[in-house]
């Protein structure tokens, strides 16, 4: 629910930005926020991203001193890194501004971006700590239902009092400040509830070599993973324009609806798999992976079909009249469908400690992605982004699934799941036939209603099949594992 709400509100926000400025500004804002995200990952040196792995592990093994020490180290490293960045900005401001923020004199907003980097880096640490304690509902509430609406509200107010682009940035800053306050308060309550913080402040246990290796590998993995996404943005800017990036940013937000179930499942699975792996309970992990894949399949296919039906209304409503926008949206949602249907492959590998394999995979994916987007964007422009997206996600799904199977023998394709796929293909064929037949019907609204009815029946049949063959109550009873 939180993911759906955040995507919807995010779409409204991005559309509001493009209406009040232009797609160039939306593209430039996307570039700036993406730059902050990747810098935030780099300056954490892997400590932030390993929190969600180590916290459940230390709790399961009853090692609170290690837990507190890891959190302290993460905060200290983040502060030191941010200090160096601030010094660099102060003493090399002209170099930084010319090289990084050249669009529309963005150098005048350099300190706004730094403040946003400072706040978002600590918010990200807060999210990882809370998720590590399996208090996922709180992090969802803050990030999806509080931070995002506050950002949209302040952006609306500040833009309307003529603060223009600085109003957009101040809205981001105020929303992140509020989120940081809430996470800080909640985390201190978590520590106070079990006296962990008070009893272990003076303890400095050393990390095991295996733990150091995990942090190093997960650090490189996250840099490579996010560099893949960031390189796409850079390639789009290099071969096309900020306007194309803005259109891609908006359309890509629509395509994220396809992955809402995958993202939700991943959030739940992260600490569960880490805890089960610490207990060496591989069989239960396999059950979770199999059930997760089936749930993702059951709920994702109808979302994909709805998005496919709404391609024309979406591009018309948002006035996306650039040549190729409809084709790009169709290709993007197909790419995200492939991404979603691979299941929680990479999260499972990460939380089971296969960081070395992930690092190798991400290096290969980075090279393949760079080549795919470089070739297709330079040749086909907007449509090339979509073609590269489909090929990239197909390769990632194959590589990730192969690695997981070789390492753990975990896979999603049992007899029941194959039957589930065959049933879905049969129903999808009926929908495709109706899609083709509906072209002779003059009433567009009647056609859309017929399609939605068929998709609803499609979902109900699949859901009945899922619940008949599997118990999904396991997701509501994780504490008894």
Image (spheres, helix red, strand yellow):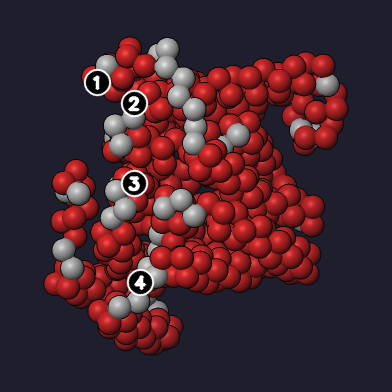
| 3D distance between C-alphas at marks 1 and 2 | 10 Å
**Disc on the earlier residue, 1 or 4:** 1
For the residues labelled 1 and 2, say whether their Cβ atoms are less than 8 Å apart.
yes
From where the camera sits, is residue 52 visible?
A: yes
User: Which mark is in front, 1 or 3?
Assistant: 3
Q: Is residue 87 left or right of residue 463?
A: right
| 3D distance between C-alphas at marks 1 and 4 | 39 Å
**Disc on the earlier residue, 1 or 3:** 1
Residue sitting nearer the eye, 203 or 289 = 203
Residue at the spot 14% in from the left edge and 72% down from the top edge: 468
Q: Is residue 148 above or below residue 1?
A: above
Residue at the spot 41% in from the left edge and 65% down from the top edge: 408
Quarter location, residue 463: bottom left
Image x and y of residue 227, in percent: 66, 48
Q: Is residue 103 left or right of residue 36?
A: right
Task: Identify the element where label 3 is drawn.
Answer: helix
For the residues labelled 1 and 3, say whether their Cβ atoms are less than 8 Å apart.
no
**Disc on the earlier residue, 3 or 2:** 2
Task: Identify the element where label 2 is drawn.
Answer: helix
Quarter location, residue 40: top right
Residue at the spot 73% in from the left edge and 49% down from the top edge: 234
Q: Would you call the spot at circle 2 few (<14 residues within 10 Å), some (14-19), or many (20 or more)?
A: many
User: Which mark is in front, 1 or 4?
Assistant: 1
Which residue is identified by label 2? 64
Which residue is identified by label 4? 412
| 3D distance between C-alphas at marks 4 and 2 | 36 Å
**Disc on the earlier residue, 3 or 4:** 3
Image x and y of residue 421, in percent: 33, 80
**Disc on the earlier residue, 4 or 2:** 2
Which residue is identified by label 3? 278
Task: Identify the element where label 4 is drawn.
Answer: loop
């Amino acid at each position: 629910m939180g993911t759906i709400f955040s995507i919807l509100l995010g779409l409204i926000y991005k559309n509001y930005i493009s209406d009040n400025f232009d797609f160039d500004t939306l593209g430039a804002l996307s570039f700036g926020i993406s730059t902050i995200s990747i810098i935030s990952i780099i300056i954490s040196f892997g400590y932030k991203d390993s929190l969600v792995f180590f916290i459940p592990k230390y709790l399961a093994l009853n090692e609170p001193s290690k837990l507190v020490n890891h959190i302290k180290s993460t905060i200290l490293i983040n502060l030191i890194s941010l200090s160096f960045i601030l010094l660099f900005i102060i003493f090399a401001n002209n170099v930084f501004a010319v090289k990084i923020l050249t669009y529309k004199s963005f150098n005048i907003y350099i300190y706004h971006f730094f403040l946003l980097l400072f706040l978002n880096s600590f918010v990200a640490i807060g999210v990882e700590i809370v998720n590590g304690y399996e208090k996922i509902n709180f992090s969802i509430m803050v990030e999806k239902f509080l931070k995002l609406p506050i950002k949209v509200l302040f952006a609306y107010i500040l833009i309307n009092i003529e603060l223009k682009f600085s109003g957009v940035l101040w809205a981001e800053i105020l929303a992140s400040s509020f989120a940081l306050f809430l996470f800080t308060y909640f985390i201190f309550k978590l520590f106070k509830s079990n006296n962990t913080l008070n009893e272990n402040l003076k303890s400095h246990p050393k990390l095991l070599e295996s733990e150091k290796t995990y942090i190093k590998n997960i650090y490189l993995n996250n840099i490579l993973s996010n560099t893949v996404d960031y390189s796409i943005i850079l390639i789009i800017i290099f071969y096309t324009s900020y306007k194309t990036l803005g259109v891609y940013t908006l359309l890509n937000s629509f395509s994220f609806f396809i992955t809402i179930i995958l993202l939700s499942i991943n959030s739940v699975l992260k600490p569960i798999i880490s805890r089960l792996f610490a207990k060496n309970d591989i069989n239960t992990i396999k059950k979770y992976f199999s059930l997760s894949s089936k749930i993702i399949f059951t709920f994702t296919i109808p979302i994909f079909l709805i998005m496919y039906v709404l391609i024309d209304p979406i591009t018309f409503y948002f006035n996306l009249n650039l040549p190729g926008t409809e084709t790009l949206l169709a290709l993007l949602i197909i790419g995200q469908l492939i991404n979603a249907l691979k299941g929680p492959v990479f999260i499972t590998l990460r939380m089971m400690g296969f960081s070395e394999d992930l690092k190798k995979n991400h290096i290969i994916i980075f090279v393949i992605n760079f080549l795919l987007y470089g070739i297709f964007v330079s040749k086909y422009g907007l449509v090339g982004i979509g073609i590269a997206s489909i090929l990239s996600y197909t390769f990632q799904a194959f590589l990730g699934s192969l690695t997981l199977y070789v390492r753990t023998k975990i896979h999603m394709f049992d007899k029941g799941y194959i039957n589930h796929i065959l049933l879905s293909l049969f129903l999808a064929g009926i929908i495709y036939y109706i899609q083709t037949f509906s072209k002779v019907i003059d009433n567009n609204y009647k056609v859309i209603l017929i399609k939605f009815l068929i998709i609803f029946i499609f979902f109900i049949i699949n859901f009945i099949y899922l619940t008949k063959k599997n118990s999904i109550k396991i997701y509501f009873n994780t504490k008894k594992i």
